[in-house]
Structures are given as C-alpha cells and as structure tokens.
Amino acid sequence: MPKVKENCGVVGIYSLTGKNVVPMVFDALRALQHRGQEAWGFAVPNKPPFKKVGLVSHSSSEFKKIAQEYASPCVIGHVRYSTMGTSTLANAQPLKVKDLCVAHNGTIANAQELSNLVGGCSFTPQSASDTLVAAERLVSLISENGEMGKALSILKNEMVGSYCFTFISDDNSVYAARDPKGFR
C-alpha cells in the first residue's frame, strides 16, 4: 500500500512589537515538514524569497545566518509536496509576483480559466503552478481595485477548489485566505 502524503504546509507570522520572527518560521516549517518534503522556503518584504530543495531540517546549520540576513517582523513560509507543476526549485514556494509573495496549499481546479483572465500568464500543468496563476490574478485585481481586501475577496469568489494561502507584501502586510468551504 502506498504511503499517504499530505499536500504542502503554509505559515504566516507577524510581530506587533517589531521582533525578528524569521527564526520562528524555521520552527514552524520543521513542524510542518511532514506535509511537504520536496522543498521549503520563506519570504519577507523587499527581498526575493529564500527557497531550498529538500528537508527543512537538513539546513538547520544555516538557520542563524539566514535569520540575520532576512531579519523581519513578518514572514510567510511553505513546505512543498507538489500536486501540480514539476518538483524543481523554480516551483518551490513562496513565489513572488511584483511586490507580493504567496505560499499556497491545495489545488485550484479552474487554474486554466484564471490564467485566461490574466492574459499573458501561460499555464500548463507541466510548466507552471496553480499558485502562480492565482498570484498573477491577485496582482491584476489589486491593480484594478486599488486594495488587497477587495481584490482577495474577488479572487476567492473566482477560484474553484480547496486551498489556503498566505501572502506578504513589500509594505509589511501579511494576509491569509482559505477556500469558502474550509477544506484547507
């Protein structure tokens, strides 16, 4: 009988006191590691996401240095078990689109339709991920509507599937969303 695998894990942490929470994301990702063992990563505002292939625990000797380099009062993180897209560092998360980083757990069943709404985002299950499609759609909705809350509400109504997301923007905002039925 094949081993049952979970599908990814996401986390978001925000400090109201300005404390560096990046060390906390390592603990959270280690705790979620059973949900995704292909790759892991995290994102803080105004820097490219940090991503690695393999287990979180295999990089523990680097945590102190990484936490200093990426020091931030807010962070999102992800452990990956792919259901769509190939298992490469390029598809590891969080993904960055403009000034927004996104980490995602779940499956968006209508990713092709969302891709068509964005125009210019080429989606195929082999070359992209439903996460990228959702992120690009959200960025376009923010541009159209001027604010994250409204854009996220529209996107949630457009997406079909079971999912949860964490988002972090370059203005130090952290957001989370899950499917309306609460499957994720």
Image: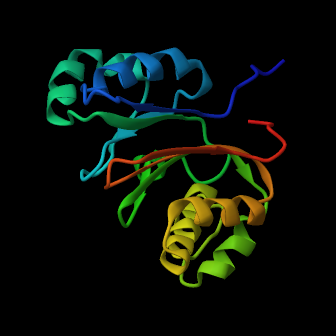
Q: Is residue 19 visible?
A: yes
Residue sitting at 54 percent across and 80 percent down? 144
Could you tell me residue 175's position as x and y percent? Answer: 51, 46
Residue sitting at 60 percent across and 79 percent down? 118
Q: Quadrant of the C terminus?
A: top right
Image-based side of 95 in relation to 58, left or right: right
> In the orientation shown, which residue stands out farthest toward the bottom?
119
Q: Quadrant of the N terminus?
A: top right
Could you tell me residue 28's position as x and y percent? Answer: 46, 20
Query: Which sits in the foreground, 56 or 163?
Result: 163
Q: Is residue 8 above or below residue 65?
A: below
Please identify the quarter of the rendering in which residue 181 is found. top right
Query: Which sits in the foreground, 102 or 109?
Result: 102
Could you tell me residue 150's position as x and y percent? Answer: 61, 65
Q: How is the image coloured?
A: rainbow
Image-based side of 147 in relation to 159, left or right: left
Residue sitting at 75 percent across and 66 percent down? 158
Residue sitting at 75 percent across and 46 percent down? 179
Q: Is residue 127 above or below residue 5?
A: below
